[in-house]
Image (cartoon, grey):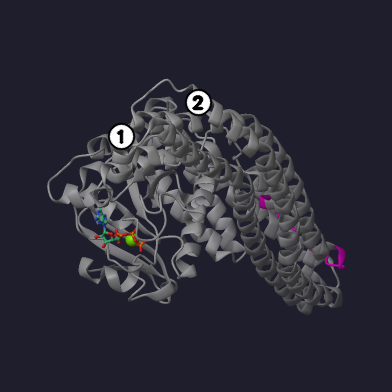
């Protein structure tokens, strides 16, 4: 992630200005065809590009301390924080005189008092954003924001409030860089991994923070950091990810220990060195996204206008029905998919049982022989050495098997991914096959397979450690080891070390099934979500297209010809942008 960034000087100032103009043209076009949401999105992005504002979003599970982190970075206690899930609306924190404004669905921007922010931004006072707040901007005279970097507070994932997770997911396309706020307990959740995976596909800068470091002992913190690093490396193929361990609580008490200064320095560098590059990337992504959606809408409008009225009506009904059927099929796919997954899990469970049946007797034999060779006389030292042997033997038996398992799991994963992708594609094809002429326009889903594959792969070769009981021998045991005859101690050490070895083998052998299952579930949830969103959008724009075509057709042939000409002119115009 620490790749060199484009510096401000590398980008001609004109690039951003031209981009801004393109966005305004897209906004005008979207406005003309009644796509108000798209028009708004284009205008917002144009303003942000023109002013060189980049969005660095704080993302993570609920209660990680995202809002607290932004308050601490900026030095203003303005974003609501609390012990229950709090943030319910995406909030952009940008440079300016201290003030707050909110944009409501139907009445534009309103300036509000900072003290009124909780009434708009919190789950408590605006549950599931029932007030229909479209945007919140908080202006602060904080030096870190002065180069155009905006810190974006997002609702936490994974709470009982689904609407909050949804709001954050919808914001992802607008993220230019991300601060992933993690914790020690649990260090990272499946949902966070899925989110990081998604964000990593579009942004270069991911900054990982482990917050609330004050809440755990140093050894627990180290364990959480090591675990998180391993997960990020294995599942997301990030190389040596830097994780800043911080405590906003302690910083606020005046104690800037841990990695706080290093973290803030990294943010300052991001703001100073790559602010403009981030904006340029946002512009590029935004233009592509908006163009694609407008193209789809115009294609649907043209198709609707070239059909006879009765056919259009029939098609609209068919589309609604097919879409409902697709939703049902998606739901019905669940059990099929679960069965598939269960079958694979069974295969891997059998593999594990086979391995253990073979490995355990061999392990026992090797261990006992090794303990017999131990030259030490002092009882406790014999015990420690026996446990070390157990570790070594577990490693030597597990490494080759885990390596082979990684390959097998990868193959099984591909198999299930392909099956699932086929099922998903069939669901989508149904929309076409049932006489629905509407262009599917699933540009975003054309790479279903790629999206299912994600970036992760299996690497099991790292041994999952279990703390060895040799290190925490109870006093009585230790005394017994000192006092009892060496042959007796050796026998007891053998039995305990074998117990430990068995546990090491069993726990590690289980990882294969568990990881396979988890990775598949994550990707399935993500893909299903994308299909549902796409279906909703297609249906909405097709309905609008058909409604408009109906109106033109009711007015007569001349009106239809005129409308058709208009649509074609717009398609040509869009192609030139
Ligand atoms: N001990 C400790 N508590 C913290 C720290 N940072 C935040 N908290 C507390 O954790 C709770 C949650 O903090 P928020 O900032 O509201 O968390 P959030 O991630 O924004 O939560 P949502 O908006 O619900 O997603 C609050 O009670 C904070 O006071 C920290 O470093 N140490
Ligand atoms: Mg919050």
Can you give x and y, in whole percent of width and height, for residue 460 in the image?
Answer: 58, 36
Note whether 195 is above or below 63 in the view shown. Answer: above
Please check the rendered image and state whether residue 434 is part of the magenta-colored stretch, yes or no.
yes
Query: Seen in the image, is 26 located left or right of residue 122?
Result: right
Q: Earlier in the sequence, mark 1 or mark 2?
A: 2
User: Label 1, on which residue?
Assistant: 482
User: Label 2, on which residue?
Assistant: 372
Residue furthest left in the image: 254
Which residue shows up at 65% across the image and 34% down it? 401
Between 295 and 385, the one nearer to me in the picture: 385
Which residue shows up at 70% across the image and 56% down it? 296
Which residue shows up at 39% across the image and 42% down it? 469
Where on the picture, by quarter, is residue 243? top left
Query: Seen in the image, is 286 located left or right of residue 350?
Result: left
Query: Seen in the image, is 380 located left or right of residue 492?
Result: left
Can you give x and y, in whole percent of width and height, for residue 282 in the image?
Answer: 48, 43
Circle 2: element type: helix
Where on the picture, by quarter, is residue 481? top left
Circle 1: element type: helix
Which region is colored magenta?
433-444
């Amino acid at each position: 992630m620490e790749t060199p960034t484009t510096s401000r000087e590398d980008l001609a100032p004109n690039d951003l200005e031209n981009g801004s103009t393109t966005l305004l043209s897209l906004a005008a076009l979207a406005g003309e065809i009644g796509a108000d949401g798209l028009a708004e999105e284009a205008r917002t992005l144009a303003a942000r590009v023109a002013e060189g504002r980049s969005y660095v979003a704080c993302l993570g599970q609920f209660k990680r301390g995202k809002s607290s982190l932004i308050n601490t970075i900026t030095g203003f206690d303005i974003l609501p924080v609390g012990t229950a899930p709090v943030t319910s609306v995406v909030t952009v924190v940008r440079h300016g005189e201290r003030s707050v404004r909110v944009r409501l669905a139907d009445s534009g921007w309103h300036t509000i008092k900072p003290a009124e922010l909780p009434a708009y931004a919190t789950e408590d006072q605006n549950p599931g954003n029932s007030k229909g707040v479209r945007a919140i901007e908080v202006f602060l005279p904080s030096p870190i924001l002065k180069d155009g970097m905006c810190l974006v507070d997002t609702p936490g994932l994974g709470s009982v409030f689904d609407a909050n997770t949804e709001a954050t997911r919808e914001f992802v396309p607008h993220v230019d860089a991300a601060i992933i706020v993690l914790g020690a307990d649990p260090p990272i959740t499946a949902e966070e991994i899925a989110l990081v995976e998604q964000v990593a596909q579009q942004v270069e800068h991911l900054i990982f923070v482990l917050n609330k470091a004050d809440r755990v002992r140093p050894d627990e913190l180290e364990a959480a950091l090591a675990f998180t690093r391993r997960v990020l490396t294995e599942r997301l193929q990030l190389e040596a990810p830097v994780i800043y361990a911080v405590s906003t609580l302690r910083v606020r008490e005046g104690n800037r220990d841990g990695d706080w200064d290093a973290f803030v320095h990294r943010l300052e560098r991001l703001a100073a060195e790559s602010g403009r590059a981030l904006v340029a990337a946002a512009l590029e992504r935004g233009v592509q996204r908006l163009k694609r959606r407008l193209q789809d809408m115009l294609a649907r409008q043209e198709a609707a206008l070239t059909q006879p009225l009765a056919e259009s009506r029939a098609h609209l009904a068919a589309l609604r029905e097919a879409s409902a059927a697709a939703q049902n099929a998606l739901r019905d796919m669940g059990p099929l998919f679960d069965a598939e997954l269960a079958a694979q899990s069974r295969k891997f469970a059998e593999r594990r049982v086979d391995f253990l049946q073979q490995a355990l007797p061999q392990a026992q034999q090797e261990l006992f022989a090794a303990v017999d060779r131990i030259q030490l006389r002092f009882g406790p030292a014999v015990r420690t050495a026996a446990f070390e042997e157990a570790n070594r033997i577990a490693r030597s038996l597990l490494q080759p098997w885990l390596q082979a398992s990684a390959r097998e799991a990868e193959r099984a994963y591909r198999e299930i991914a392909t099956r699932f992708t086929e099922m998903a594609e069939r669901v989508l094809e149904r929309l076409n096959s049932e006489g629905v002429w509407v262009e599917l326009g699933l540009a975003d889903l054309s790479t279903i397979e790629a999206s299912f594959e994600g970036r992760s792969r299996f690497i099991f070769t790292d041994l999952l450690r279990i703390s060895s009981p040799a290190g925490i021998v109870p006093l009585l045991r230790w005394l017994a080891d000192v006092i009892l005859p060496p042959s007796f101690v050796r026998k007891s050490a053998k039995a305990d070390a074998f117990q430990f070895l068995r546990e090491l083998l069993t726990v590690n052998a289980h990882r294969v099934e568990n990881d396979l299952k988890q990775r598949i579930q994550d990707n399935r949830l993500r893909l299903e979500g994308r299909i549902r969103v796409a279906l909703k959008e297609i249906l909405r724009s097709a309905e609008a297209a058909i409604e408009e075509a109906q109106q033109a057709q009711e007015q007569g042939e001349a009106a239809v010809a005129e409308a058709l000409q208009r649509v074609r002119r717009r398609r040509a115009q869009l192609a030139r942008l």
